[in-house]
Image (cartoon, rainbow, N blue to C red):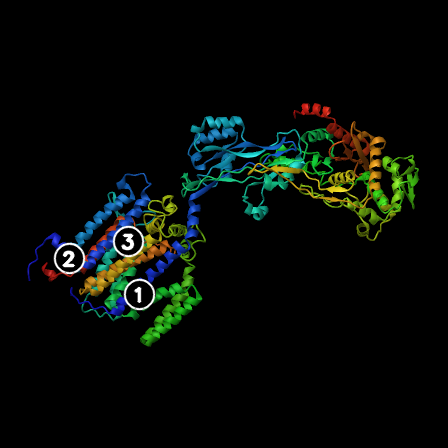
């Protein structure tokens, strides 16, 4: 085997497979759209450019691209070897805000380094993906047995519980959301996935007799088709049934504001000034954009501040208002394209570890996009999940670019044995 | 370990792809729904989010008399407004305002709170400020951030005439009415004609409000005007001309003075009302803007009821003026002929009751003509015995007694015209007798009329049967093309009486003024016809009536009614007043003299 000469330019173009090139173009386009929306949201703020949202975001993006490039050139083996260690370090960092974090509006999410603030829970998303991927790569793993699913669940649920108590519902849900696609990808039994997700559906359907009834029928059908051991089926069935029965009782023990958050999901226009206000204003912004939008910098909802959190969780509404249906569809198509490219390259990749990482990133990305946009169009309550590459936020931008760098890294078929490089 | 081989089943890949595709598809559908299907709805909400509409009030049309003299006009009332946020930033502003308006700072806070519609929306804290305060504010504009003044048009009453019952007043529209007339552009807090002409001609007098559009942010802060939305200028209301002759009106009002009663002068051919007095009244200026609670309370609790319109709402027994109806009944069905006579000895005995003539010693022999001229009760007692009550009642209803005149004023009474059926019902069980008839024929008892019905009656006699609808509104000047629109008025003709009957009535009523009970109404240079009446009033002194008309050489006859509550005999004060009014009208030298005194050229 020939020894590889290192030439940055050559290496870069060579290693940029077609998929990676597409990735960079799509991510670049999304970032540009995000910047233009941020530019619009901050154009009437009288501050020096670099102190404005747009200026800071630009700086973070530049550093994010540097981080992405760095990760791209790292040895893939390094991720694999250090996955568990950096996971542990990550957990420590996630706990840290409780001790030295600054409470921002009652939430312990941040660690401060001088003027910079840093949100470890964002990076933790990648570490959860890494460690689950590493675990599922074990050749001796009896993936069809239920016990093999327990460690990946723990990898996800541990940071989830910590972050949930910060409290940060949105981020904690991401840890949970990446587990299942990765398990499916690794070959776990569908039945196992099903019984893991069944309790959630039992809770959700329990509020209405008819939905719960349909759900129970579905449970019976699934247990019948899968023909598991009878005692197991019965135990699981009774467990789900009693969970559904208890949910309404527990619900009544929730505090009103907690109930309100969930109520918002169902009827947002009932109380425009209350919990549904943000979602309603966001819908008005998007809806009033029409087909072609009001034009860059001319969104009235945005500029007159009717739209809350416009540079953050509701950046998509700015796009919807100023660029209209065309703008939102373009963003939607770009994200769709990105995820399809991920799934395809994960499918083609021979390397199991890389494939799992790509699926993990894809599912985290998909979760972010789906939940964020569903929230801005009024399908979901406000959970605090930003839109990748568009929303403002340093830690989040770094995480997004780092994730892309990781995907590009692992999806590059290295010509030689990696250990030699 | 690191290089574990990847083997994914196509089914699992497709499953994930399906989830992704369906979620994206649902979101796409939703975006299509809110951005394309529901676009106009959300656009509307977004617009109303950012656009604040500033109404520009339109002045109401002026009200003028028949010759164009102003009765009601508009003036500007200045109000002080405060932007709550800006005012709360400065302590000096508060102090200046409290000392300027002479109120405590608690009161100031209370006022701001009451009118506040947002931190950056001006709230009214004082209305109708005087010129001194206004100029102080103007001078110290820079030192008083957030303090503004605005003006709104309010009614002013430059003429000497009160005309309060005619003009009526404006009041803030109530919620129920608002529901019904919302489509005409009324809003909460708008003033609307509540009584009188202001109410009746509301659609003509009312202007169309204009609008200015400004852009505001989420806090309601003004951030500029709108580019593509032009200001809509207010359109003032149309000027309304009344049939009122302002000079005669002022004269008649001063003539009645402090007495309670009603005077109406009407053109007998057209129904135009030249003078309309209901006393006591009130100064219309009390209602120029928002009525203060204590003023309102005084008006309502005043025992002489100044808000009560005696001309159209007051119902009174007409007294002897109604004897004409009995004459016409007799002549119509030829129950007696005019030469039929009786001897009046001052009383008329029927059964055990004695009905008296107003003249104790009696009138002696009376024929029909003399009975009218001297208003002899006994003659009419005898006459009515020969006439069926329903015939009498039908004849009265020829002149539309018991029915509203449909004058252009709100809240008119119909009065009461009894017939056999009415009496049967009223005296059910007791029974009514011929005596009831004797009361009715001299205009007493259950018969009730309004002064406006009586002037119409006089007009019908003057024109030999033409019944016109009395009206105050004459015409209005259309804003859009500066042309007059003249109100059309319906009229009716009575055909039941022969020319001889009319002639007879005319002669008799001429002699009433010439040599009978109505001598006080006699006027130089013009023929006056009339009939006096003294209506007994169980609560006090008799009401004095005079109805009549003039027959000038040229021009239309003017019908008149004078009714003075507790005025005693009709031959006294009522006839006298009618005479003075006719004299004022037909003898211009006196008019000139009085006009000079009142400052109306």
Let me know if residue B130 appears in the view.
yes
Picture disc at residue A388: 3
> Residue A392, image x and y in percent?
29, 48
> Residue A268, image x and y in percent?
42, 54
- Establish if A310 lies above or below B482: below
- The local secondary structure at tag 3 comes to loop
Q: Residues within 10 Å of mark 1 (few under 14, many from 20)?
A: few
In this rendered view, identify the residue nearer to me: A281 or A222: A281
- Establish if B289 lies above or below B12: above
Q: Is residue B540 left or right of residue A377?
A: right
Q: Residue at left 20%, top 52%?
A: A68
> Residue B79, image x and y in percent?
52, 33
In front of the other: label 3 or label 1? 1
In the rendered view of the protein, which quadrant contains the N terminus of chain B? bottom left
- The local secondary structure at tag 2 comes to helix
Picture disc at residue A15: 2
- The local secondary structure at tag 1 comes to helix
CB contact under 8 Å: marks 2 and 1: no
Tell me the distance, in whole angstroms, between the alpha carbons under discs 3 and 1: 22 Å
Q: Residues within 10 Å of mark 3 (few under 14, many from 20)?
A: many
Tell me the distance, in whole angstroms, between the alpha carbons under discs 3 and 2: 25 Å
Picture disc at residue B18: 1
Tell me the distance, in whole angstroms, between the alpha carbons under discs 2 and 1: 30 Å
Q: Of the residues under marks 3 and 2, which one precedes in the sequence? A: 2
């Amino acid at each position: 085997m020939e020894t590889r000469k290192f030439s940055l330019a050559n290496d870069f173009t060579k290693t940029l497979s077609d998929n990676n090139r597409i990735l960079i173009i799509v991510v670049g386009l999304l970032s540009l759209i995000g910047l233009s929306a941020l530019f619009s949201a901050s154009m009437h703020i009288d501050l020096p450019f670099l102190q404005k949202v747009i200026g800071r975001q630009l700086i973070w993006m530049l550093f994010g691209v540097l981080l992405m490039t760095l990760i791209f050139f790292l040895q893939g083996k390094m991720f694999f070897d250090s996955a568990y260690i950096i996971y542990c370090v990550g957990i420590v960092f996630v706990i840290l805000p409780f001790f030295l974090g600054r409470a921002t509006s009652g939430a312990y999410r941040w660690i401060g380094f001088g003027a910079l603030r840093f949100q470890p829970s964002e990076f933790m998303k990648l570490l959860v993906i890494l460690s689950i991927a590493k675990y599922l790569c074990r050749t001796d793993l009896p993936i069809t047995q239920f016990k093999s699913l327990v460690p990946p669940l723990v990898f996800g649920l541990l940071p989830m519980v910590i972050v949930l108590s910060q409290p940060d519902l949105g981020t904690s849900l991401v840890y949970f959301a990446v587990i299942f696609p990765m398990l499916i990808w690794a070959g776990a039994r569908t039945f196992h996935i099903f019984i893991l997700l069944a309790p959630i559906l039992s809770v959700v359907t329990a509020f209405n007799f008819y939905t719960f009834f349909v759900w129970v029928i579905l449970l019976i059908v699934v247990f019948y088709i899968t023909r598991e051991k009878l005692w197991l089926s019965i135990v699981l069935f009774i467990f789900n049934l009693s969970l559904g029965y208890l949910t309404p009782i527990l619900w009544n023990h929730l505090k009103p504001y907690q109930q309100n958050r969930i109520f918002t999901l169902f009827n947002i226009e009932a109380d425009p000034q209350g919990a549904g206000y943000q979602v309603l204003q966001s819908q008005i912004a998007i809806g009033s954009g029409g087909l072609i939008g009001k034009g860059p910098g001319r969104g009235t909802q945005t500029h007159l501040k009717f739209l809350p959190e416009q540079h953050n969780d509701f950046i998509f509404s700015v796009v919807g208002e100023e660029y209209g249906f065309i703008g939102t569809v373009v963003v939607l198509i770009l994200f769709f394209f990105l995820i399809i490219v991920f799934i395809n390259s994960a499918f083609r990749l021979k390397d199991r570890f890389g494939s799992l990482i790509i699926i993990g990133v894809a599912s985290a990305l998909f979760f972010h996009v789906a939940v964020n946009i569903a929230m801005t169009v009024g399908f979901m309550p406000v959970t605090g999940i930003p839109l990748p590459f568009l929303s403002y936020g340093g830690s989040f931008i770094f995480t997004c670019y780092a994730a892309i760098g990781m995907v590009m890294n692992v999806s590059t078929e290295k010509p030689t044995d990696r250990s030699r490089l | 370990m690191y290089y574990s081989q990847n083997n994914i089943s196509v089914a699992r890949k497709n499953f994930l792809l399906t989830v992704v595709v369906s979620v994206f598809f649902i979101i796409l559908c939703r975006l299509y729904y809110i951005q394309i299907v529901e676009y106009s709805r959300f656009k509307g909400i977004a617009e109303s989010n950012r656009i604040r509409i500033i109404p520009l009030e339109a002045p109401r049309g002026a009200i003028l008399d028949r010759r164009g003299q102003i009765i009601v006009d508009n003036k500007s009332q200045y109000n002080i407004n405060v932007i709550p946020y800006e005012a709360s930033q400065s302590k000096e502003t508060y102090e200046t305002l409290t000392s300027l308006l002479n109120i405590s700072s608690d009161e100031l806070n209370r006022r701001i709170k009451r009118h506040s519609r947002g931190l950056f929306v001006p709230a009214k804290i004082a209305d109708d400020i005087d010129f001194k305060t206004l100029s102080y504010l103007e001078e110290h504009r820079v030192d008083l951030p957030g303090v503004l003044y605005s003006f709104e048009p309010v009614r002013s009453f430059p003429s000497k005439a009160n005309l309060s019952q005619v003009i009526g007043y404006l009041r803030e529209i109530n919620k129920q009415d608002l529901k019904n007339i919302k489509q005409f552009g009324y809003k909460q807090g708008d003033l609307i004609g509540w009584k009188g002409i202001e109410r009746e001609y509301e659609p003509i007098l009312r202007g169309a409000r204009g609008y200015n559009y400004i852009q505001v942010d989420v806090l309601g802060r003004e951030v500029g005007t709108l580019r593509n939305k032009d200001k809509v200028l207010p359109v003032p209301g149309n000027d309304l001309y009344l049939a009122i002759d302002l000079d005669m009106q002022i004269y008649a009002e001063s003539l009645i003075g402090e007495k309670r009663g009603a005077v109406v002068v009407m053109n007998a051919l057209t129904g135009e009302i030249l003078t309309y007095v209901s006393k006591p009244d009130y100064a219309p200026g009390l209602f120029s803007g928002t009525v203060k609670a204590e003023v309102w309370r005084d008006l309502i609790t005043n025992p002489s009821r100044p808000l009560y319109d005696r001309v159209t709402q007051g119902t009174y027994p007409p007294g002897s003026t109604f004897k004409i109806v009995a004459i016409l009944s007799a002549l119509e069905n030829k129950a007696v002929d005019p030469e039929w006579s009786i001897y009046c000895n001052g009383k008329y005995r029927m059964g055990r009751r004695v009905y008296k003539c107003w003249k104790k010693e009696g009138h002696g022999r009376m024929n029909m003509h003399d009975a009218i001229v001297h208003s002899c009760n006994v003659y009419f007692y005898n006459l009515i015995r020969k006439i069926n009550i329903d015939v009498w009642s039908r004849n009265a209803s020829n002149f539309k007694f018991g029915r509203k005149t449909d004058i252009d004023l709100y809240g008119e009474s119909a009065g009461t015209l009894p017939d056999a059926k009415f009496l049967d019902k009223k005296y059910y069980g007791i029974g009514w007798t011929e005596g009831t008839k004797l009361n009715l024929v001299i205009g007493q008892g259950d018969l009730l009329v309004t002064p406006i019905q009586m002037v119409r009656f006089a007009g019908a006699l003057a024109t030999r049967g033409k019944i016109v609808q009395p009206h105050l509104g004459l015409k209005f000047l259309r804003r859009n093309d500066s042309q007059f629109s003249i109100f059309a008025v319906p009229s009716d003709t009575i055909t039941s009486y022969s020319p001889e009957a009319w002639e007879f009535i005319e002669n008799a009523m001429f002699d009433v003024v010439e040599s009978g009970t109505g001598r006080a109404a006699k006027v130089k240079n013009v023929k006056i016809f009339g009939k006096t009446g003294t209506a007994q009033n169980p609560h006090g002194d008799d009401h004095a009536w005079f109805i009549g008309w003039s027959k000038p050489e040229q021009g239309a006859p003017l019908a008149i009614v004078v009714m003075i509550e507790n005025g005693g005999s009709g031959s006294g004060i009522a006839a006298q007043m009618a005479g003075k009014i006719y004299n004022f009208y037909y003898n211009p030298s006196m008019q000139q003299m009085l006009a000079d005194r009142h400052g109306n050229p």
